[in-house]
């Protein structure tokens, strides 16, 4: 009796390796199967490893990171959603790297940067990335409102709440940006010359650096000319960006997109992956050929940490493009390059 | 024939285990553990639980097998008509390879 109870507990523990959707479909029969296995083969490390590994594969598939799942609609949605969340996370690091690159462009700390090919490529790639992300967020927001008006609210409640809270916080913080800019312009004595492109980019880079640098290098204390309340708020910005990205990913998995949106999601994500690639190549080229005069600004304090960021930054665009390519490849013929309007939860459009 | 073979070879390194599962179900409906015991009996291979359920999910999504109503916690699986055709085509292709190999071994090596 005790042995049966132990077997049942062990089986239930092993089931936790699998994602919720899988457990819902196969959980009961899988536990029953394991209990019978335990009776025949009490101790077996190979079996435990097999279950753990297959459970992780099922989880990766659930997130759209492998092609193991053959539920095409779910796979496509999962791949797109995960890509969006990854990009949102990477954008925090990229914004920090961009700001460092801009600030380090000149040997003199408060000298306005010159607009050149590399600063131009980095700034334009970063700007387009943000615009594309905002366009996707807007499209999802409109689709969410449409679906709510039609009364199919339930699958959207949690991600909408997360998106509203994190997005609201980001907007609130954005209100204080002019004040922060004022603080920096005092330091520069001459103030920000908005008509001078180099000066404007430099000022924006300073604020971006202020918002991101304590996350990218937590031991680096900034906050020069900024109140302690503002410093805490700034520290929460990357978390809010990540939560916003995750909320977008969940919404993308659950929302009924309009036809045009469904067609545009694949090209938009390929564009995002491409822009990240362009940013990475330009950044890497600049750091290895020429580079800024004060090198220590370029990599975040620890050179090894900088290298790790660059490796991650190189991997993410590859992951984004390959996961969307895989998702698209495994779509049934005639359905490639777009996703279904019916949500992955099975609600009718 | 090509598409039938693809249905199995598309499973990658699990293709061999998939043939074992389909062959077992060709003999009648079975739940997970009965399948494992049957495969063990006719092929001498033990399918680990993780591998078996990954395969069942993939074979089901490809329409080669179908899940029946669960009896208590045990859910039996059945080979579909499409699954039977795919298995037959695959076995026929393997038999051709087998015969060629046997004939050549006999001719050149006096074996088999």
Image (spheres, coloured by chain):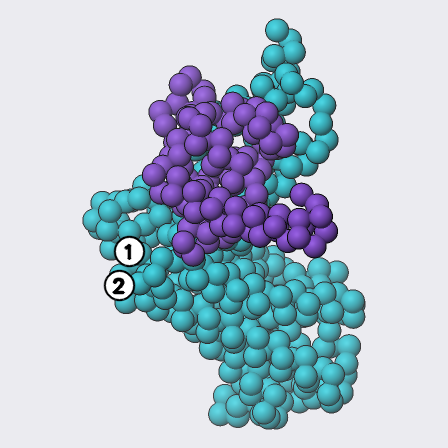
Chain colours: A cyan, B purple
Residue B109: horizontal and vertical position, in percent? 72, 51
Residue A46: horizontal and vertical position, in percent? 70, 33
Q: Quadrant of residue A312?
A: bottom right
Residue at image x 55%, y 87%?
A120
Which tag, 1 or 2, sits closer to the chain's start?
2
Residue at image x 68%, y 67%?
A311
Residue A148: horizontal and vertical position, in percent? 26, 49
Q: Residues within 10 Å of mark 1 (few under 14, many from 20)?
A: some
Residue at image x 57%, y 47%?
B98
In the displayed image of the protein, which residue is found farthest to the top?
A1
- Which is more toward the observer, A281 or B53? B53
Q: How far, Cα to Cα, is label 1 from label 2?
A: 7 Å
Can residue A62 be seen here?
Answer: no
Under circle 1, the secondary element is loop
Quadrant housing the N terminus of chain B: bottom left
Q: Do callouts 1 and 2 point to residues on the same chain?
A: yes
Residue at image x 40%, y 71%?
A267
- Protein chain holding label 1: A
Q: Is residue A127 left or right of residue B66?
A: right
Residue A217: horizontal and vertical position, in percent? 71, 63
Quadrant housing the C terminus of chain B: top right
- Which is more toward the observer, B14 or B73? B14
The tag on residue A341 is 1
Under circle 2, the secondary element is helix
Report the number of numbered marks. Answer: 2
Can residue B51 be seen here?
Answer: yes
Depicted A70 relative to depicted A299: above or below: above
In the displayed image of the protein, which residue is found farthest to the left?
A150
Q: Is residue A295 left or right of residue B8?
A: right
Q: Residues within 10 Å of mark 2 (few under 14, many from 20)?
A: few
Residue that mark 2 sits on: A259
């Amino acid at each position: 009796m005790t042995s049966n109870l132990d077997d049942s507990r062990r089986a239930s523990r092993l089931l936790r390796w699998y994602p919720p959707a899988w457990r819902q479909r196969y959980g009961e029969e899988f536990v029953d199967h394991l209990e019978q296995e335990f009776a025949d083969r009490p101790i077996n490390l190979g079996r435990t490893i097999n279950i753990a590994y297959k459970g992780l594969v099922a989880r990766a598939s659930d997130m759209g990171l492998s092609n193991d799942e053959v539920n095409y609609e779910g796979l496509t949605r999962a791949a797109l959603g995960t890509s969006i969340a990854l990009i949102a996370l990477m954008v925090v690091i990229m914004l920090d790297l961009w700001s460092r690159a801009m600030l380090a462009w000149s040997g003199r700390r408060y000298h306005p940067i010159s607009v050149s090919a590399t600063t131009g490529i980095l700034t334009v790639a970063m700007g387009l990335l943000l615009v594309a992300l905002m366009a996707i967020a807007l499209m999802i927001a409109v689709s969410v409102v449409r679906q709510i008006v039609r009364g199919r609210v339930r699958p959207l409640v949690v991600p909408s709440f997360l998106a509203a809270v994190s997005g609201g916080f980001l907007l609130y913080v954005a209100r204080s940006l002019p004040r922060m800019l004022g603080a920096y312009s005092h330091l520069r004595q001459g103030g920000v010359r908005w008509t001078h492109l180099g000066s404007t980019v430099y000022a924006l880079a300073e604020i971006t650096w202020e918002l991101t640098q304590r996350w990218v290098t937590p031991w680096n204390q900034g906050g020069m000319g900024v109140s302690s309340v503002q410093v805490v708020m700034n520290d929460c910005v990357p978390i809010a960006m990540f939560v916003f990205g995750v909320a977008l990913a969940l919404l993308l998995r659950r929302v009924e997109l309009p036809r045009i949106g469904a067609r545009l999601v694949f090209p938009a994500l390929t564009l995002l992956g491409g822009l990240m690639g362009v940013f990475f190549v330009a950044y890497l080229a600049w750091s290895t050929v020429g580079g800024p005069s004060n090198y220590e600004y370029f990599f975040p304090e620890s050179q090894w940490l900088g290298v790790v960021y660059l490796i991650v930054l190189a991997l993410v665009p590859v992951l984004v493009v390959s996961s969307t390519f895989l998702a698209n490849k495994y779509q049934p013929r005639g359905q490639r390059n777009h996703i279904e309007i019916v949500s992955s939860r099975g609600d009718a459009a | 024939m090509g598409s039938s073979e693809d249905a199995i070879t598309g499973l990658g390194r699990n293709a061999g285990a998939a043939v074992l599962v389909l062959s077992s179900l060709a003999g009648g409906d079975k739940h997970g553990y009965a399948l494992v015991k049957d495969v063990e009996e006719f092929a001498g291979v033990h399918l680990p639980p993780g591998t078996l359920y990954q395969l069942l999910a993939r074979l089901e999504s490809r329409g080669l097998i179908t899940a029946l109503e669960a009896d208590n916690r045990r859910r039996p699986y059945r080979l579909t008509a499409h699954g039977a055709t795919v298995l037959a085509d695959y076995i026929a292709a393997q038999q051709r390879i087998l015969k060629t190999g046997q004939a050549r071994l006999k001719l050149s090596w006096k074996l088999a």
